[in-house]
Amino acid sequence: MRHFGHIAPEVRQRLFHREPCEFGTDSPARLLSAALGATLYSPATRPRLADDIVKRSGHGVVSMVLCLEDSIGDEDVTEGEENLVRQFADLAGRPGAELPLLFIRVRTPEQIPDLVRRLGPAARLLSGFVMPKFTEERGIPFLEALATAEAESGRRLFAMPVLESPELLYRESRVETLEGISRAVGKYRERVLALRLGVTDFCSSYGLRRAPDMTAYDVQIVASVIADVVNMLGRADGTGFTVTGPVWEYFRVQERMFKPQLRRSPFLEGQAEELREALIEHAMDGLLREIALDQANGLLGKTCIHPSHVLPVHALSVVSHEEFSDAQDILRPERCGGGVLRSAYTNKMNEVKPHRAWAERTMLRAEVFGVANEDIGFVELLAAGIPT
C-alpha cells in the first residue's frame, strides 16, 4: 500500500516531485509509525465491516481501528468479538484485496490473546491492538498480553496505547503518571508503534467540549497535557515515540473554506463542477487548523471518526517542495560540521545543527507521504484524492 495509491499513476506524477513509498505490514516499525496517517475508527459491531474496510482502503485509508471499547455499548462486546472473527474470516477469503493496517481496540488485556486465538489463520491480517486508558499500572498487563499473543501466533503485533486517563490530566499526578508510562513503553519499545491522545476523555473530566471552530489547542487544559506528553514522550533524541493527533468530532460542511483558492487553482481548471463541490464538502476550518497545529506541536497522524477527515489529514501531511529543499540542504554530508546557510528559496535561514532533527523528521514524512511539486498545494492534493 501507499498514500495516494488510490489515484491514477499519471495524476500522482503531476502532483508529486517525489511519490510516496510503498509499505506493508512487514515494513520497519519506524516507517509504519510515520505512515499511519489518518487512522479511521469503526465500531466492531458493523455488520458489513469487511466490505467497509475494503471500500475505505480503495479511498485512501491506510490504517483502521476496529473498536470494542467506547464506540459500542457494554452489552455489545460479545457480539462485537464474534463479528470481528466473522469479518476477518471474510477478509481472509478475498485474495488480492488490498487492506489497510488493521488494529483492534480492546477493553481488557485478556481479550488480546483470546481474539488472536479465535481469529486463527486470519490473524495474519492483524497489525496489533489499541490499549485504552493507558498508565503504567494498567498498561503493563496489556503489553504482557500482547507479548503472549505474539509468541503464540508467531506474528509481529504492535501496541498503540491511548493516553486518556484522569491521572494524566490532573496537575498533581501528571508528571508521575508520565514517568510511569515512559517506563512501561520503554520496556516494550519494539512493540509500541505509536502513542495516541484521548482528548475527548480529557475534556470529559471537566465537562468540556470544544466547538467546531475551536481546536484542541484552544482548550488550555488540554493543550497543556499535549505539551507535556510531547515533552516527555515525543523527543527527537532517540528516546521518543510517534504521538498522534487527537480526534476531530465534527463533520458538518463549512462552505466558505478555500473558495478563493478554488477559483485560482490551475490544477482545477476545466474540472467538473462536481469536483469543486466535493472539495468544498471536505473543507472544515477547525479540522484544518488543528491538523496544522498538530504538526507544529510535534504530532504526526490523527485519530479520525469520519471518512471525510482522512484526505485532509493526508493532504496536509505531504511535504512541500520548499520543506524538502530545506531538509535536503541541511542533511548534506558536507554540512555535517554545522553552519548557517540561506535556503534555496532565499526566504529563510537554515541552521544546520539546530534544524537537523527537524530535517530528519521531514525526510521520513517525505518518504511515506511524498513531496509535492513546486506548484502543487493542499487544494490540488485534496481534489485529486476525492473518490469519483
Image: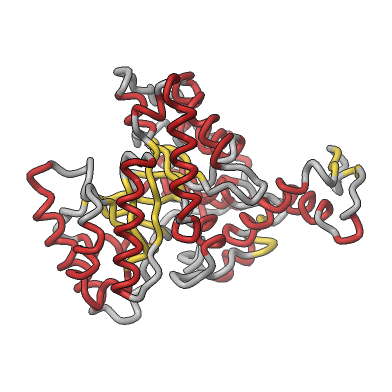
Give the answer, above or below, for where 137 lies relative to 85.
above
Q: Is residue 300 left or right of residue 66?
A: right
Please say whether residue 274 is visible from this viewpoint: yes
Residue sitting nearer the eye, 193 or 274: 193
Residue sitting nearer the eye, 88 or 375: 88
Q: How is the image coloured?
A: secondary structure
Q: Where does the C terminus fall, quadrant-wise? A: bottom left
Residue at 32%, 54% (x, y): give it. Answer: 65
Residue 305 placement (x, y as % from top left) = 33, 44
> For residue 98, which quarter of the picture?
bottom left
Residue sitting nearer the eye, 286 or 333: 333
Residue 221 placement (x, y as % from top left) = 45, 20
Please say whether residue 385 is visible from this viewpoint: no
Residue 260 placement (x, y as % from top left) = 58, 34
> For residue 102, which quarter of the picture?
bottom left
Residue at 86%, 38% (x, y): give it. Answer: 349
Residue 157 placement (x, y as % from top left) = 38, 65
Residue at 76%, 52% (x, y): give it. Answer: 327
Residue sitting nearer the eye, 67 or 176: 176
Q: Is residue 202 left or right of residue 284?
A: left
Q: Given the current orientation, which residue lies at the most extreme bottom position? A: 95
Residue at 46%, 49% (x, y): give it. Answer: 185
Give the answer, above or below, for where 155 lies relative to 167.
below
Q: How many marks?
A: 0
Q: Is residue 366 left or right of residue 188?
A: right
Q: Is residue 49 left or right of residue 379?
A: left
